[in-house]
C-alpha cells in the first residue's frame, strides 16, 4: 500500500482495457512520484525537464531518433536490451541498435558496402563469418544486415559526401551459413551533440565518444532476431562507450592481410560468427 495519498489516488484510477499497459503506467507513476519525493525539484526545474523532452522530440527525423540517443546516453537502452536477451551461454550477446538505423540496400555476398569517398582513403577491410544456432548448426539463408560510420566517423545521413545507403547492406548467408562483405575500417566517433543528447552529456560531464564498431541485425527462420555490434580491439573508448554498449564477447582484433578474398591491396580481416537463440527458448527446457 502506497503511503502517499496522491500516488494512491492516481493508481486507483488506472483501469484501462490492457492489463500490461496498466502495469507499465502504474510502475511509472510510482517511480516518478518517488523521484519527486527524493529530489524535490522546484517548479522551474520540473518545467526545464519537460522542455528538454519537447526539444528532444523536435530533433527527431526519419534518419535520426534523439530519444533513442538520450536513452543510450543514460544506459537505459542497454538495460532494456539486457533484460530482454537471455539464452544459452554460447549465444551471441545483443547490443543497442543506436539512433542511425535506416533501410539498407540488398547486396550480394562479397560486395563492397563502401561506395563513397571513404573507400579511397580508408583501410580496406573484409568482414566474414558464419551464422549458427546455439547447437552449432549452420543457418542457411540467414539475413545479415550491417551498417557503420565512415573512417571520418559519419553515417550516410550525416554526411553530404555519402549517398543514402552507403556503408549499409543486407546479405543472405549461403547454404553453410557463411556471409562476407568488403568495407573500410570504421573509426571511433562522437555521438551527435547538437541536440538534447549533447546537452545531457555536457551537463553530467561525460564525453560523447563511441568506440569503433559495426552494427549487425541477424535473422533466421525459427530464431530470435539479434541486434548487436562488433567492436574493434584496441580502441581507446572501449571502456567508456557513451552508449554503455560494449561487451567483451563482441570485441574483435582486425588481422593484417596481403592476399585472399579477391583483394588486390593490403587489407584487414575481421571474423565474426553469430549464434542465434531459438524462438521460445526457456532455461532448462
Image (tube, rainbow, N blue to C red):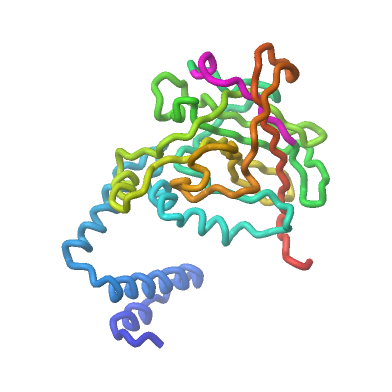
Question: Which quadrant is the N terminus positioned in?
Answer: bottom left
As drawn, is 204 to the left or to the right of 107? left
Question: Which quadrant is the C terminus positioned in?
Answer: bottom right
Q: Residue at x 40, y 29 (%)?
A: 158
Looking at the image, the residue that sits furthest to the left is 44
Tell me the quarter of the picture where residue 182 sits: top right
Q: Nearer the viewer, residue 213 or 82?
A: 213
In the rendered image, residue 146, in percent from the top left (x then y), is placed at 59, 34
Q: Residue at x 71, y 43 (%)?
A: 274
Q: Residue at x 44, y 50 (%)?
A: 72
In the rendered image, residue 221, in percent from the top left (x then y), is placed at 73, 46
Q: Relative to 72, say whether 167 is above or below.
A: above
Q: Is residue 121 magenta?
A: yes
Q: Is residue 88 magenta?
A: no
In the rendered image, residue 130, in percent from the top left (x then y), is placed at 75, 37
Q: Relative to 243, say whether 283 is above or below.
A: below
- Residues in magenta? 118-129
Amino acid at each position: 500500500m502506497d503511503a502517499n495519498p496522491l500516488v494512491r489516488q492516481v493508481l486507483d484510477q488506472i483501469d484501462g482495457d490492457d492489463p500490461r499497459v496498466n502495469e507499465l503506467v502504474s510502475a511509472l507513476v510510482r517511480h516518478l512520484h518517488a523521484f519527486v519525493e527524493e529530489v524535490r525539484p522546484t517548479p522551474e526545474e520540473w518545467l526545464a525537464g519537460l522542455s528538454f523532452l519537447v526539444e528532444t522530440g523536435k530533433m527527431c527525423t526519419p534518419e535520426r531518433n534523439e530519444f533513442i540517443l538520450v536513452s543510450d546516453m543514460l544506459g537505459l537502452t542497454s538495460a532494456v536490451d539486457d533484460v530482454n536477451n537471455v539464452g544459452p551461454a554460447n549465444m551471441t550477446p545483443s547490443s543497442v541498435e543506436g539512433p542511425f538505423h535506416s533501410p539498407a540496400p540488398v547486396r550480394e555476398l562479397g560486395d563492397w558496402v563502401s561506395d563513397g569517398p571513404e573507400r579511397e582513403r580508408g583501410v580496406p577491410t573484409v568482414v566474414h563469418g558464419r551464422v549458427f544456432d546455439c547447437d552449432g548448426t549452420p543457418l542457411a539463408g540467414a539475413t545479415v544486415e550491417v551498417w557503420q560510420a565512415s573512417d571520418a566517423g559519419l553515417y550516410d545521413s550525416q554526411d553530404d559526401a555519402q549517398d543514402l545507403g552507403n556503408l549499409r547492406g543486407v546479405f543472405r548467408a549461403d547454404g553453410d551459413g557463411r556471409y562476407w562483405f568488403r568495407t573500410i575500417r570504421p573509426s571511433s566517433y562522437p555521438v551527435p551533440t547538437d541536440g538534447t543528447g549533447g546537452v545531457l552529456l555536457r551537463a553530467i560531464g561525460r564525453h560523447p565518444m563511441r568506440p569503433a564498431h559495426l552494427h549487425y541485425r541477424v535473422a533466421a527462420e525459427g530464431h530470435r532476431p539479434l541486434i548487436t555490434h562488433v567492436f574493434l580491439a584496441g580502441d581507446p573508448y572501449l571502456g567508456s562507450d557513451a552508449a554503455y554498449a560494449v561487451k567483451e564477447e563482441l570485441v574483435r582484433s582486425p588481422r593484417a592481410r596481403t592476399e585472399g578474398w579477391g583483394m588486390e591491396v593490403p587489407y584487414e580481416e575481421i571474423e565474426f560468427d553469430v549464434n542465434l537463440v531459438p524462438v521460445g527458448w526457456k532455461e532448462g527446457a
